[in-house]
Image (cartoon, grey):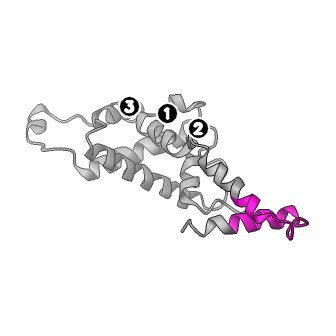
């Protein structure tokens, strides 16, 4: 079975609670690691932009994974989140998400994964790409190529546009 080669498509499929990693049979660990890396990268960029508070992520995790609480004296001397602790929290969050079979809707997933779901699984609101594709199809299908088989037409059109993606 051929899997999606695009990492963005793999991440998008993992973010759908109905699919998660159910569609993978052979390269499950590789795709899971790709998904974890994407969540860590996304969360670190969002934490750096001060959009998320990791304490809310930690509190969401504490319901399912018990953790040790630090003393208030230790909190006084901490100067920000430790990146390794952040990565561990994110990995736990992703592992809990992937192992939880009760999630049925994207509305039920944690906030970081919900924002990633919106980023990776939302369609482009403009029809310009579709109009451009129809225009190229009109240019490709001329009188000389009028008897082209559908499969050849589709391959020619995709080859024309896929040269821009690499």
Gap in angstroms between the C-alphas marked 1 and 3 = 10 Å
Gap in angstroms between the C-alphas marked 3 and 2 = 17 Å
Question: Which of the two discs, 1 and 3, labels the residue nearer the N terminus?
Answer: 3
Are the residues at dot 3 and dot 2 in contact (C-beta closer than 8 Å)?
no
| Residue at the far right in the pictured view | 147
> In what element is the residue under mark 2?
loop
Pick the quarter of the image with the C terminus: bottom right
Q: Position of residue 153 (x, y in %)?
A: 80, 64
Pick the quarter of the image with the N terminus: bottom right
* Residue stretch rendered in magenta on the structure: 136-159
Which residue is nearer to you in this view: 53 or 96? 53
Image point (8%, 37%), residue name: 76
> In what element is the residue under mark 1?
loop
Mark 1: few, some, or many residues within 10 Å (few <14, many ≥20)? some
Q: Position of residue 126 (x, y in %)?
A: 57, 42
The residue at which mark 3 appears reads as 60
Q: Quadrant of residue 46?
A: top left
Q: Quadrant of residue 137?
A: bottom right
Question: Which of the two discs, 2 and 1, labels the residue nearer the N terminus?
Answer: 2
Q: Position of residue 97 (x, y in %)?
A: 50, 39
> Going by the image, does 118 lie left or right of 132?
left
Which residue is nearer to you in this view: 6 or 160? 160
Are the residues at dot 1 and dot 3 in contact (C-beta closer than 8 Å)?
no
The residue at which mark 2 appears reads as 17
Q: Main secondary structure of the magenta part?
A: helix
Image point (59%, 57%), residue name: 28
> In what element is the residue under mark 3?
helix
Are the residues at dot 2 and dot 1 in contact (C-beta closer than 8 Å)?
yes
> Going by the image, does 85 lie left or right of 11?
left
In the picture, the disc for residue 109 is 1
């Amino acid at each position: 079975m051929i899997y999606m080669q695009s990492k963005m498509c793999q991440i998008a499929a993992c973010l759908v609670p109905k699919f998660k990693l159910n569609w993978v049979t052979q390269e499950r660990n590789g795709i899971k690691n790709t998904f974890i890396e994407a969540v860590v990268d996304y969360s670190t960029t969002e934490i750096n932009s001060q959009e998320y508070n990791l304490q809310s992520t930690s509190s969401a995790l504490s319901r399912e994974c018990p953790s040790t609480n630090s003393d208030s004296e230790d909190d006084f001397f901490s100067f920000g989140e430790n990146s390794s602790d952040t990565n561990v929290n994110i990995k736990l969050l992703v592992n809990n998400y992937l192992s939880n079979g009760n999630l049925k809707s994207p509305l039920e997933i944690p906030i970081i994964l919900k924002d990633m779901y919106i980023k990776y699984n939302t369609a482009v609101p403009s029809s310009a790409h579709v109009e451009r594709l129809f225009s190229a199809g009109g240019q490709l299908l001329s009188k000389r190529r009028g008897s082209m088989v559908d499969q050849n037409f589709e391959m020619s059109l995709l080859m024309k546009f896929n040269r821009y993606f690499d």
